[in-house]
Amino acid sequence: MRTSLIGAAAAAALAFAGLGSAADAEKWKSRSIYQVMVDRFARTDGSTTDNCDVSRFCGGTWKGLMNHLDYIQDMGFTAVQISPIVKNLEEHTAVGEAYHGYWSVDNYALNPRFGTEKDLKALITEMHKRDMLLMVDVVVNNMVQAFDNVIPPKVDYSKFNPFDDKKYFHPYCNVTQWENSTDYQKCWLYPYGVALADLNTESPAVVNELGSWIKGLVSNYSIDGLRIDAAKHVNDEFLPKFVAASGIFALGEVLTGEPEDMCRYQTRGLLPGMPNYLEYYPLNEAFNGGSLLDVADLRNKAATSCNDTTVLGSFIENHDMPRFANRNDDLALAANAMTYILLNDGIPTVYQGQEQHFKGNSTPFNREPVWGAGYNKTAPLYVLTSTLNKVRNHAIKLSPNYIGKTSETLWADVNHLCLKKGPDGSQIVFCINNKSSKGSSYTASIGGFKANDKVVDVLRCKTVTADGTGNITMYMGQGEPRVYVKATTLKDTGLCTETQEDGPIEEKSGAAALGMTGGLLFAAIFGWGLLFA
Ligand SMILES: *[C@@H]1O[C@H](CO)[C@@H](O)[C@H](O)[C@H]1NC(C)=O
Ligand SMILES: *[C@@H]1O[C@H](CO)[C@@H](O)[C@H](O)[C@H]1NC(C)=O
Ligand SMILES: *[C@@H]1O[C@H](CO)[C@@H](O)[C@H](O)[C@H]1NC(C)=O
Ligand SMILES: *[C@@H]1O[C@H](CO)[C@@H](O)[C@H](O)[C@H]1NC(C)=O
Ligand SMILES: *[C@@H]1O[C@H](CO)[C@@H](O)[C@H](O)[C@H]1NC(C)=O
Ligand SMILES: *[C@@H]1O[C@H](CO)[C@@H](O)[C@H](O)[C@H]1NC(C)=O
Ligand SMILES: *[C@@H]1O[C@H](CO)[C@@H](O)[C@H](O)[C@H]1NC(C)=O
């Protein structure tokens, strides 16, 4: 009697975990994620002096983040992903300090650099009060210790909690074969500055311990989703067990641009979702001498190889890659990239500082403190992001089908990609291009609406009326993206309360040049005024 009761309870618990996870995937698909690296987002005292050595701790905290949730929420984000929360190594190494949180030493202690348990819980309570979900980045591939350049690395395993013995780890070998999954899953990721002691995630003891750890972590802190760091570097079989133990949704990091390599994680049921590295590469290239046809092509490949692209995390920046503007800092190009990732199929993920057009190169220079930009809410990409999130959130509210229906390609050529996202009535028709702010003015015709629909470009609050075939005229210029919705759907959104009829865009040379002269003249007069005062 007793055993059968326990058996039934366990079965019910398992079934619940499975359902909970699927329900969570649905919940996450309609969210939009702002990615925070805690050490670089906000300090407890809110100070904005940018005296930060980017290879060391710079002072950001959970409390600082809590105090600046308005900055994130006003941009329309409905979820926040934070960098790892557990205790890391304290040493200053040849590759800097553990400000990023990826160098775990104790899975059962919080990182005191970022605050106390009370601070973290207060942050999460405040987020949930605002109906924002929390995604926490977790490390399962390795534990970390400072490394003195002696091979094999001398690791004092007794310093790790709970994996305090050599038996929990793979024997040392350096990953050298990046195409051989046995090699990149069982060997240790680069020993340089630190040793990344590679957990033996094939061993039942490690699987069970990580499972019970994540279950406890999720329940102790009411975590809503996980990002699994270096998911590609643990064995396949480990991943679904870990996700099931957590009971929640996860995006697992699988760094590859190859559809077969990425999509097998989905088709074999290994991970619920992954950041969309498939589109990341061609999207970047399209704005750096490449073609938007390659993005369209990759979209088709992903649609056939993966079984659900709406659960991939759509992004153009993260903490591992050089900033978008590092290669080309043209603002119109950045606006097009932002428009694409926010309106694309999948879960939009914006990395802190992207909205301030940061330009940092590879790690650690892509981890600039956000306070350096003074949390400026009038920065052009901040304003753009806010509009796009609002439009997307509203479309989701109008139609639950908005998320599930993958977008239709209306027009793709080397310079343009125009998509229709969402069912008729709540559809968003958007066009990105790679012409840059020097782009000339022209018109193009695009479909996606019904005959005579009155339509608004929400980025400029300009109206156009669809012709008898449901096509509209797009007035293009200065390389700006276009985002159209039916005028009637904007009611109660606060967006475009005043609109004007659209028309040809003036070329930059005329009005813009004149504006510049006026501004310079004003500055000059003002400057002289000060000089003589
Ligand atoms: C480890 O392998 C990488 C190539 O994957 C190589 O660049 C590096 O020098 C190797 N390091 C050691 C300590 O063997
Ligand atoms: C793949 O890597 C493993 C571990 O390093 C090695 O034993 C195996 O020989 C490699 N396979 C091939 C085909 O090179
Ligand atoms: C969760 O809280 C319990 C009770 O305080 C504690 O025993 C456990 O270690 C915690 N788990 C984690 C992962 O922090
Ligand atoms: C994708 O594949 C997984 C694993 O086979 C399956 O559970 C899931 O239902 C599939 N989803 C779709 C949308 O086909
Ligand atoms: C846009 O695409 C065209 C055609 O592929 C290419 O020649 C051009 O360099 C691209 N523009 C940018 C800014 O990369
Ligand atoms: C905020 O950004 C706007 C637009 O780029 C700029 O005009 C303004 O000076 C900035 N404000 C501050 C305080 O930096
Ligand atoms: C209507 O728009 C589609 C693209 O959505 C385009 O292919 C077609 O040529 C347009 N029709 C006209 C008459 O311009």
Image (cartoon, rainbow, N blue to C red):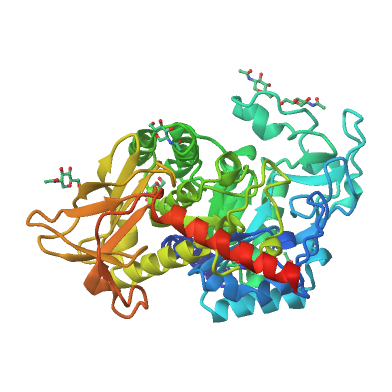
Quadrant in which ligand 1 is drawn: top right
Quadrant hosting residue 304: top left
Left or right: residue 380 compared with residue 525: left
Left or right: residue 378 compared with residue 62: left
On-image quarter of the N terminus: bottom right
Left or right: residue 522 compared with residue 123: left
On-image quarter of the C terminus: bottom right
Q: Is residue 40 visible?
A: yes
Find residue 265 and report its horizontal and vertical position in percent: 49, 41
Of residue 448 and residue 523, the one placed in the foreground of this image is 523
The residue drawn where x is 37% and y is 78% is 494
The residue drawn where x is 54% and y is 65% is 7
Find residue 125 and report its horizontal and vertical position in percent: 62, 79
| Rendered view: 372 above or below 62 | above
Quadrant hosting residue 219: bottom right
Of residue 13 and residue 460, the one placed in the foreground of this image is 460
Of residue 279 and residue 108, the one placed in the foreground of this image is 279
The residue drawn where x is 68% and y is 58% is 37
| Rendered view: 453 above or below 308 | below
Number of numbered discs overlaid on the protein picture = 0
Quadrant hosting residue 495: bottom left
Find residue 200 and report its horizontal and vertical position in percent: 72, 40
| Rendered view: 216 above or below 441 | below
Find residue 317 and report its horizontal and vertical position in percent: 56, 48
